Image: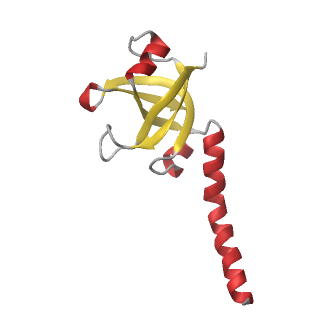
Amino acid sequence: MRTVLLLAIAALSLAAPAAAWKGELEAGVRPIAEVNTRAESGDLVVVEGRITEVTTGSGSRLVVTLEDATGSVLVRVPEHLLRKLTDGRSPEIGRRVRVSGKWDHAYLDNELWGIHAQNAERVE
């Protein structure tokens, strides 16, 4: 019985860091490098950085590269967010933004992961 209890405590302590990270991730901005290494499909992520590139993804969807001091990430930008952020124009390279959305690779390349923006705001 004691062995079973110790094994259960050990298993919970090993699982705790991942669960704690997810709770923190959903609560605030995380470094892009941390999101790139720790996020899993479907996680809600929040990052902040500068737009360094604007391209067109599959189906003519707009994809921006967002970069902070730790790394870069692809962000799919839905049409309604473009209207909100830039009055429908392409995002400006160099603009600092905060983006939250779902971590996934659909609408991007099957090999690449990124954020499907659900909300975005200018930081500067």
Viewer-closest of 13 and 51: 13
Q: Residue at x 38, y 14 (%)?
A: 90
Q: Quadrant of the C terminus?
A: top right
Q: Quadrant of the N terminus?
A: bottom right
Position of residue 10 measured from the top left corner of the image (x, y, whole percent): 68, 75
**In the image as oriented, which residue stretches furthest toward the left?**
59
Q: Quadrant location of residue 91?
A: top left
Badge count: 0
Q: Residue at x 49, y 17 (%)?
A: 94
Q: Quadrant location of residue 17?
A: bottom right
Position of residue 69 measured from the top left corner of the image (x, y, whole percent): 57, 33
Position of residue 79 measured from the top left corner of the image (x, y, whole percent): 38, 21
Instruction: Judge left or right: residue 28 versus residue 119.
Output: right
Instruction: Judge left or right: residue 22 versus residue 115.
Output: right
Q: Residue at x 65, y 37 (%)?
A: 28
Q: Does 38 appear above or below 101?
A: below
Viewer-closest of 39 and 44: 44
**In the image as oriented, which residue stretches furthest toward the right?**
2
Colouring chosen for the image of the structure: secondary structure
